[in-house]
């Protein structure tokens, strides 16, 4: 089978990694910006308010998260909207696109515990269910979990069980490699389909998303597996690599299959091109550090310093530093904002 089919089965097939409720953070396989600090969602809420104040979206817009896991980021946004502009909670709607029923239940439960009946959470199983006039859409680390094809020197990767091998490229992948000058690495084959679905779901939107990767391709392999906060290069678990096996002798590809996260660096140039081909405009591309500063994270931290005790402030400041520290998430992660006009 093509590698994209194998990866899709790993993450979303029967008993796939993301079909079960997974822990994120210390008890899980990896950390995210959302699990690091509530000021991640708070900064995005500040961006939402600015977009409404500028008149691009109205106070009645739908605020929707895609790939929400337990719903922490959207809940943090709600909390900061309440703090910064409480009257907006009377008009804004909040929703999550969530295909997994178990996650749906966890999200509903968390919102109920956090806000009671004050905030109603809407659920959509897919973007195909959505038909809205306008929306502020957010997502964190979703594109690195889209199935990809792996190419190298004019061939593409296939899987026979847990055995990997390279063979002839499909016409679609061959054309992408030819037109984009790609020699080696991952190709996110679902980006264009997602961009098209988003454009159909919302007549007008601003889409804010964060992920790791670069605007310029390096033409190398970034595919890797995360399990219990340990990273395994995918090809080190295959017969393609015969050196340094002692470093990964604690596991096999078969043991990690469907029991761990498999991911790769996002080619943001390819992502942007796919969105623009589907009628969206790239409004901004910046490092997570630069984006969160522009969204006002330092102003929010200053507000906390003035309205809380020193211990609380220092604790939250240390958490927020992880988001913007260049040696942690600040430079490695990028933010891109897309807009589609009505």
Image (spheres, rainbow, N blue to C red):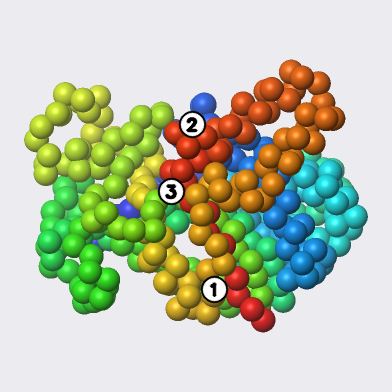
Q: In this view of the protein, can residue 66 be seen by the observer?
A: no
Question: Quadrant location of the C terminus?
Answer: bottom right
Does residue 338 appear left or right of residue 238 in this picture?
Answer: right
Q: Earlier in the sequence, mark 1 or mark 3?
A: 3
- Graded by Cα atoms within 10 Å as few (under 14), some (14 to 19) or many (20 or more), the crowding at tag 2 reads some
| Secondary element at tag 2 | loop
Q: Residue at x 78, y 39 (%)?
A: 114
- Residue 72 location (% of width, % of height): 66, 42
Residue 28, label in figure:
2
The residue identified by callout 1 is: 281
Residue with the most extreme left position? 242
| Secondary element at tag 3 | strand
User: Please, is residue 89 above or below residue 261 in the view?
Assistant: below
The answer to which quarter of the image holds residue 52 is bottom right
Q: Give me the C-alpha separation between circle 2 and circle 3.
A: 19 Å
Q: Residue at x 38, y 33 (%)?
A: 227
The residue identified by callout 3 is: 212
- Residue 195 location (% of width, % of height): 50, 71
- Graded by Cα atoms within 10 Å as few (under 14), some (14 to 19) or many (20 or more), the crowding at tag 1 reads some
Q: Nearer the viewer, mark 1 or mark 2?
A: 1
Q: Residue at x 13, y 66 (%)?
A: 154
Does residue 127 appear left or right of residue 61 in this picture?
Answer: left
Q: Earlier in the sequence, mark 2 or mark 3?
A: 2
Closer to us: 335 or 172: 335
Residue with the most extreme top position? 311
Q: In this view of the protein, can residue 339 be seen by the observer?
A: yes
Q: Residue at x 54, y 73 (%)?
A: 281
Q: Give me the C-alpha separation between circle 1 and circle 2.
A: 36 Å
Closer to us: 155 or 96: 155
Q: Give me the C-alpha separation between circle 1 and circle 3.
A: 20 Å
User: Please, is residue 213 above or below residue 337 in the view?
Assistant: above
User: Please, is residue 239 above or below residue 268 in the view?
Assistant: above
């Amino acid at each position: 089978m093509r590698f994209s089919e194998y990866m899709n089965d790993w993450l979303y097939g029967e008993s796939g990694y993301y079909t079960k409720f997974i822990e994120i953070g210390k008890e899980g396989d990896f950390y995210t910006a959302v699990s690091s600090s509530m000021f991640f969602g708070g900064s995005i809420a500040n961006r939402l308010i600015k977009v409404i104040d500028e008149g691009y979206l109205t106070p009645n817009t739908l605020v929707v998260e895609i790939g929400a896991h337990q719903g922490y980021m959207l809940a943090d946004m709600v909390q900061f909207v309440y703090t910064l502009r409480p009257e907006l909670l009377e008009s804004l709607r909040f929703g999550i696109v969530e295909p997994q029923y178990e996650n749906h239940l966890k999200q509903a439960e968390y919102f109920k515990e956090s806000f009671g009946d004050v905030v109603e959470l809407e659920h959509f199983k897919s973007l195909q269910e959505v038909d809205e006039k306008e929306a502020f859409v957010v997502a964190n680390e979703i594109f690195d979990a889209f199935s990809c094809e792996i190419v190298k020197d004019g061939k593409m990767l296939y899987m026979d069980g847990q055995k990997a091998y390279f063979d002839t490229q499909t016409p679609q992948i061959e054309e992408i490699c030819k037109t984009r000058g790609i020699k080696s690495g991952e190709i996110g084959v679902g980006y264009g389909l997602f961009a098209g679905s988003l454009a159909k779901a919302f007549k007008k939107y601003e889409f804010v998303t964060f992920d790791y990767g670069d605007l310029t391709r390096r033409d190398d392999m970034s595919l890797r597996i995360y399990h219990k906060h340990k990273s395994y290069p995918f090809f080190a678990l295959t017969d393609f690599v015969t050196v340094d096996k002692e470093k990964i002798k604690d596991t096999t590809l078969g043991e990690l299959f469907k029991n761990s996260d498999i991911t790769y660096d996002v080619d943001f140039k390819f992502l942007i091109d796919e969105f623009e081909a589907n009628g969206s405009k790239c409004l901004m591309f910046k490092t997570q550090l630069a984006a969160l500063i522009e969204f006002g994270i330092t102003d929010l931290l200053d507000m906390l310093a003035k309205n809380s005790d020193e211990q609380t402030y220092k604790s939250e400041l240390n958490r927020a530093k992880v988001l913007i520290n260049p040696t942690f998430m600040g430079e490695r992660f990028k933010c891109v904002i897309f807009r589609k006009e009505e």
